[in-house]
Amino acid sequence: MTVKFNVGDVVELRKEHPCGSKQWEVTRTGADFRIKCLGCQHQVMLPRPKFEKSVKKIVKSVAAEE
């Protein structure tokens, strides 16, 4: 089963960022994902398979709020 990610979702990754935060906001979806660290605002582009493998859980979903 594939999980649907939306722009604005907050996800928790398996490894923490060097700043100490594990929470990231999804700012772009598609073949590549752009995510922004909620600790230091650093942005990273990841290919979809690597992103989906590294997500531990969805902390806040934009779709659930609507």
Image: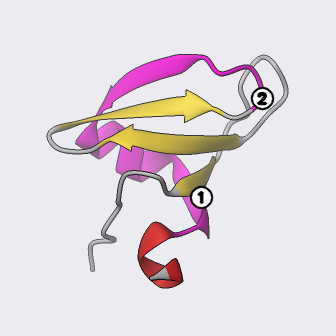
Which residue is farthest right? 20
Q: Is residue 41 left or right of residue 32?
A: right
| Nearer to me, 33 or 6 | 6
- 11 left or right, relative to 23: left
Q: Residue 26 falls in which quadrant of the image?
A: top left
Q: CA distance from mark 2 to mark 1?
A: 17 Å
Near-viewer residue (1 or 45): 45
Q: Mark 2 near mark 1, Cβ–Cβ under 8 Å?
A: no
Q: Quick one: SS at disc 1?
A: strand
Quadrant of the frame with the N terminus = bottom left
Q: Which mark is residue 20?
A: none
Name which of mark 2 and mark 1 comes first in the sequence.
Answer: 2
Name the residue beneath numbered marker 2.
39
Q: Residue at x 50, y 57 (%)?
A: 9
The part of the chain drawn in magenta is: 39-61
User: Is residue 56 in the magenta section?
Assistant: yes
**Type of amino acid at the residue the image marks with label 1:** Lys
The residue at 17%/44% (across/down) is 30
Q: Quadrant of the C terminus?
A: bottom left
Question: What kind of residue is marked 2?
Answer: Gly
The residue at the point 74 percent across, 20 percent down is 40
- Which of the numbered marks, if any, corresponds to residue 56? 1
Is 45 covered by the magenta stretch?
yes
Crowding at mark 1 (Cα within 10 Å: few <14, some 14-19, many 20+): few
* Residue 65 x/y as whole percent: 53, 80
**Number of other residues with Cα within 10 Å of mark 2, as a class: few under 14, some 14 to 19, many 20 or more:** some
Q: Secondary structure at mark 2?
A: loop
Spot the residue most to the left: 31
